Amino acid sequence: MHVLVCIKQVPADPSAVKVDRKTNTLIREGIPVVVNPFDLFAIEEALRLRERMSSSGQKGRVSVITMGPPQARSALEEAIAMGADDAVLLSDRAFAGADTLATAYTLSRGIRRIEDSTGAKVDIVICGRQSTDGDTAQVGPELAEMLGIPHLVRVRKVESLTRESIRVERIADGGYDVIESCLPVLLTVEKGINQPRVPSLRGLMRARKAGIPVWGAQELGVEAQQVGLAGSPTRVIRVFSPERQRRAEMLTGSPEAVARLLVDRLMTAM
Amino acid sequence: MGDVWIFAEVSEGRPLDVVYELLGGGRPLADDLGGKLAAILPWGADQAGEASTKEAVVRDLIASGADLVYVVQSRELVLRQEEPHAQAIYELANQYRPDVLLFGATTFGLSLAPRVAAKLGTGLIANCTTLSIDKGSGLLLMTRPAFEENIMATMTCPDRRPQMATVRPRAMKRLTPDPGRLGEVLTVVCDLPSPGARVVEVVKEDQDQAVDITDAKIIVAGGRGIGCKENLEMLEELAHLLGGAVAVSRPVVDAGWAPESRQVGQSGKIVSPKLYIACGISGAVQHTAGMSSSDIIVAINKDPGAPIFDIATYGIVGDVCQIVPALIRELKGRR
Amino acid sequence: MDYSLTEEQRMIKDLASRIARERILPEAARLDEAEEFPWEIMRVLGESDLFGVWIPEEYGGLGGGVFEQCLVMEELSRACAGVATSYAASALGAFPILLFGTEEQKQKYLPDIASGKRLAAFALTEPDAGSDAGNIRTTAVRDGDSYILNGTKQWITNGGEAEVYTVFATVDRDKGVRGITAFIVEKGTPGFEFGKKEKKLGIRSSSTRELAFRDCRIPRENLLDREGKGFIVAMRTLDRTRPGVAAQAVGIAQAALDLAAAYAMERVQFGKPVGEFQAIEHMIADMATQIEAARALTYSVARMIDAGARDFSKESAMAKVFASDVAMKVTVDAVQIFGGYGYMRDYPVEKLMRDAKVTQIYEGTNQIQRSIIGPQVLREAARRKAGQAKGITNS
């Protein structure tokens, strides 16, 4: 059984990202990056599914894929260090500036190419619930649609897994759904579904030496206008600071004094 | 001539609150575009027996601003199953070509909308808080807080249709229902393929159900600045004295100090209580996006430069651990 | 300061630092308060391969040495010295097997210790044999293909938690230190029992217990090296592990400095951060300088050992005595800089001060270390003098 995890490299502190007001693009240079924290749960869950398979006598394989600049290799290395079998980096100048649809499209082509090379379908695709920088949670469902497979978002527990189907709990507003799907399927996993493992030293050494193929537009057989900014239907037209019309009345003094002042104000106002 | 469509998510035979908010927010868009405001109402097997319920819902949607209700009937449109819902909306949109298609940013809406967008090959903007039509281009301007910082971003989808967005609950105001409004109803019976993923059980499980922060009139909110989980008890006491509820910012949830159901902000709930006391919350847009429309905002923070003071009505520079106990004593003293 | 780490060493340091930050630091205060053994963290350390950094690859380790172990100790100690102690005690218990064990013993025990599957412990100290390690009263009596152990060990780190113990007993009290013999004893052996867990000033998440042997029969193949070689086994082991205690002290001191420096910039009195007062500034300067000196000495000694030096008792003792004294001084100063807050248990510096103290005491008190260093320096001086005298007559 082949499990594939889609991950993203994000700024360690998303609030440190600044926007270039001229080009409306993110300035990412010089900002420390990490594997999107949500994706660590996705990697861990894939490794656990592999363990589950091997305990029932099936062979499992965990692959990891990301789209990003060449430096995103370090995110894939981390996944290999945690225990993933192999990884692919989708990287090309043409991929830059992609919105969620263009990202999902590029990932879907990467997955197709992996499937072509193995001659078999990927059985389970796992994504983190969302990225900490984009915060949209859209790429997973869009990717599932492009792959023509069902998707289950916000999975908090995998109840059972067979060769043909999977049964999970997914968070819903006001509770959770127990849901059963045929394979292949795409899952986005909730933080807290597991505790991601720390990489091992042997894993880190293996990752450092791992051959990670880099596929660009040519390898994926995509036209430049289908990917990146050119392939993105949406545009950022303006970034701005929210209005700040109110000015606070500052209350000063000892804790007791400001408490008294505040309660006075609130009694009058409410 | 652009129509504006909104997806009417139904739970237990009733549209969610956000559906009425979408109608309220979609109404001016349709007017600006000179098109109709339509609601897509999926009606599955589980509700099919109750024709009177369906009729009441349709009337309600029209009273709340819809010009047209597409009732999409299929036994596959039960529960929260994305595939048949996406297929039905895709077929309908392909046939009638709306200009704008909006979903509530509920768990299901956030899962369904991208599936629909990918089917239609169009763009989708998540978690919008403001929507308007650009007078010059006629494009939908979709605004959302971005990058967890004090930045708002306005996006468009210039070339592909429909222009799609998910909209935060509580971000838009519902209209006062007008029972006299007239509207059309178009029933579409769909033959949808059975989905690969099926809901087999729905479990209600809101541990924190007793406290719905979106309903609270008074909210005492804690951020990273409260220091530790134990200090939430102090906020609980203050909230109890005021007859309000405790909410938190995202870092507090991330630290595991409070459940996500208590989170206010871009990735949490949007609230607009009469009084919002922000304790140790710096005021990043991530958070203020969820509470800036509160009537009175009190900010207590150690850092006099914290942006929360920019939107606060009253500000106190100081340690939450000293100010809050003083407030508790003061309130108790006045009883 | 740049210590020219290899890529592998940097990787070890980074991983240890990450585990310290992400897994240990958030738990440190709770574990200290509850005096709870950090099993979950031990599991993580095991899965990350860090227990095996100093164990040769043929026994399941990563093939590093004392220096690599010091890098791990320093990083873990920055987050919690109690956790670091539990980690180090396993190495202390296993080093005798690596240094003196037979091939069978190494194959049997080291891979599980390298993977963290089993913890080890080192049982030398007794109620009447502390610094005077030769005064051991636990006896081992040969009986056919077995030895029968009787006696009590005191203050054994990882006692009760570890699976594998290196136990020192005497086969003949009349022979003094030449009667001391080392054995490998597994937890669960009939007649091997544990006393209550001790309550300690610091390193409270580590486990310290009494071990009791009552007619405990162990197979002869668990004898380490030969009868009567136990004292050598113990001393050679401690020579190699003392840099680890030094690294622990450096880590504790560094944590104290980091906290104190950050606090000094944050705490405002008389209208400016207290760090801008020269009194505090100079304290910070001294703390930083002493820590760097301790680190440099520790690393040098560890590298000297790994390079294959034959005799390093003096240097090893120097690193331990210097670094632990620095840790004590620096942590006391850090509490001072924090003032009243430093004395409160809600703030982390008082824990560092409590934890630092043990580094001056265990694995040979600092007095014993000086008794190793002093005589050797004098012996070297005497030898030089004799050499010079000889040189003169020869010329």
Image (cartoon, rainbow, N blue to C red):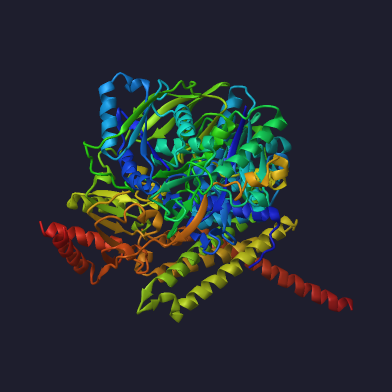
Q: Find residue A159 and report its horizontal and vertical position in percent.
A: 47, 26
Quadrant occupied by the N terminus of chain C: bottom right
Classify C298 as above or below C87.
below
Residue most extreme to the right: C395
Horizontal side of A135 relative to B238 (left or right) equals: right
Occupied quadrant, residue B38: top left
Q: Residue furthest left?
A: B335
Q: Nearer the viewer, residue A136 or C348?
A: A136
Residue at the limit of the structure toward the bottom, as seen here: C278
Measured from the top left, where is residue C365 in percent x and y? 54, 60
Is residue A128 among what the camera can see?
yes
Viewer-closest of C64 and A50 = A50
Q: Is residue C189 left or right of residue B300?
A: right
Does residue C94 appear left or right of residue A20 in this picture? right
Nearest the eye: A232 or A30: A232
Q: Give how far across and how far down residue A57 sits, in percent.
A: 62, 22
**Is the C terminus of chain C in the top left, top right, bottom left or bottom right quadrant?**
bottom right
Q: Give the residue drawn at x 58%, y 59%.
A: C247
In the rendering, at what x and y percent does residue B252 appear? Answer: 38, 51
Of C288 and A227, which appears nearest the observer? A227
Q: Quadrant of residue C387?
A: bottom right
Where A5 sits versus C313, above or below?
above
Where A128 sits versus A157, above or below? Answer: below
Question: In the image, is residue A93 above or below residue B185?
Answer: below
Q: What residue lies at 69% left-to-right and 50% top-to-bottom? A: C64
Q: Is residue B258 shown to the viewer in this render? A: no
Q: How many marks?
A: 0
